[in-house]
Amino acid sequence: DKGTGFSFVQCAHRVHFIVCGKDKRQQWMDFWGFKTCYAKDKYIPDKILKSPKSVIAAFIRGLFSADATVDKNDGRVIWASCSKNMVDRIKCLLQSHFGICSTIVSMDKGEYGIHYHLGLSCTRRKFWESINFTEGNPKKNILGKFLEVKGRVIYDRIYKIEDSECNVVDIEV
């Protein structure tokens, strides 16, 4: 803490960030460039986007540790959001900084709007080695069981190739 009003507490498989006082919370939000918005308007602040690879990895690790799922049948990692901008940026960061390929599937949730699912399957070893989940997170154990799956070769048909926002070729399968 050291008088900042901020502290971190490790509880089971999560780290809790504790802010003492509304003004301190706002200072922390302002420092990182976060603004209050609706879920569909979420974004990654420029300060994170321009940070070193280790900070970007920590940001994605926290995001996936909190909100992603790992399929218990095939080890596929899936993260969902209703913010198209956020999903596109995470996909771009995964590819450009870590060489992790992913796919985005949009799902119409009726009155809840469109949700976007970002999935990782063939590159789960790269995800494990460069980002992973937080220590003690059960998702880490599930993913670990699928790192050495042998005899499975996955072929995907490429049906669309287009340029993405971050000068990385986006190949959808």
Image (tube, rainbow, N blue to C red):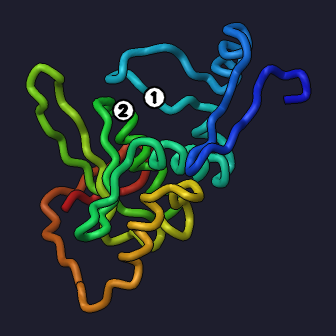
Quarter of the image with the C terminus is: bottom left
Residue 121's place in the image compared with 168, above or below, is below
- In the current view of this chain or complex, which residue is farthest to the left? 110
Residue 108 in the image: x percent, y percent?
11, 33
Question: Which sits in the foreground, 117 or 20?
Answer: 20
Point 18% across, 41% down: residue: 106
Position of residue 61 in the picture relative to residue 91 (left or right):
right
Quarter of the image with the N terminus is: top right
- Are the two marked residues, 2 and 1, in contact with CB atoms closer than 8 angstroms? yes
Point 28% across, 65% down: residue: 72
Point 68% across, 49% down: residue: 52
| Picture disc at residue 43 | 1
Q: Quadrant of residue 23?
A: top right
To which residue does mark 2 refer? 85
Position of residue 173 in the picture relative to residue 43 (left or right):
left
Residue 137 in the image: x percent, y percent?
50, 55
**SS of the residue under disc 2:** helix
